Image (cartoon, grey):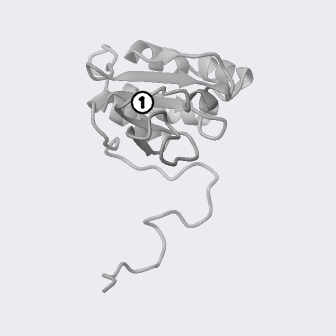
Amino acid sequence: MNKAYLVSCTNSRASDLAAAAKVFKDASQSGTPAKIAPGVEFYIAAASLPEQEAAEDAGDWQALLDAGAKPLPAGCGHVLALELDFWNLGVGISASNRNFKGRMGSPDAKAYLASPEVVAASALSGKISGPGWYEKPVGVEKVVLGEGMASLRKIE
C-alpha cells in the first residue's frame, strides 16, 4: 500500500480526524510520535476550515502532522482530484464515501474504502489493517455491523 487518504466531506470532520489521531497516539511510545510506514504517503484535509480548527484545538491535527501526514487545504475539492490519476497504478486506502473502477485515478489502481481509523492504521503499518480496537461511536444508537442479531451462514 502506498497511499492513504483521509480527505472527504463525509469522513473528515473533527471527530474523524480525532479517531485517526487516536491510532497514532495509541501507537506512540515514550513520548515519541508514531510515524507512517516508509513508502506511504498519508494525505489529510478537514472537510471545512471550522472542522480543521476544531481538530487543531484538540491537538489531533498536530498528532497527524507529527506522524508524517501531508496536509491539504480544508474542503472537499480534493475528492474530485482523485480522478486526475492521483493514485496512478498504486494501492491505496481512502475514507472517501464512494468508489468505482477508475474513481481513484487509473482504472488499474487498487483503491479501498475504509473508516478513518482503518485508514490511519493502514498508513501506520504500510498495509491495509485495523487499529486493533473497536469503540462504538459516541451517540450512535443504531445497529452496528458485528453488533446485530443476524447470524452468519454459508450461502450455497
Q: Give the left or right position of residue 114, taking residue 54 as reference.
A: left
- Relative image position of residue 104 (x, y in whole percent): 49, 36
Please rate how many residues cluster around mark 1, counting C-alpha atoms within 10 Å: few if below 14, some from 14 to 19, many from 20: many
Q: Residue at x 27, y 36 (%)?
A: 127
Q: Which residue is drawn at 46% across and 28% down?
A: 21
Q: Quadrant of residue 8?
A: top right
Q: Say which quadrant the C terminus sits in.
A: bottom left
Q: What residue type is labelled 1?
A: Ala
Pick the front one: 109 or 6? 109
Q: Which residue is drawn at 49% across and 41% down?
A: 102
Q: Give the left or right position of residue 100, taking residue 90 as reference.
A: right
Q: In this view, does 151 lie above or below 26?
A: below
- Relative image position of residue 138 (x, y in whole percent): 59, 48
Secondary structure under the numbered disc 1 in the rendered image = strand
Q: Which residue lies furthest to the bottom in this view?
A: 156
Q: Residue at x 27, y 16 (%)?
A: 30
Pick the front one: 100 or 97? 100
Disc 1: which residue: 4
Q: In this view, does 99 lie above or below 45?
A: below
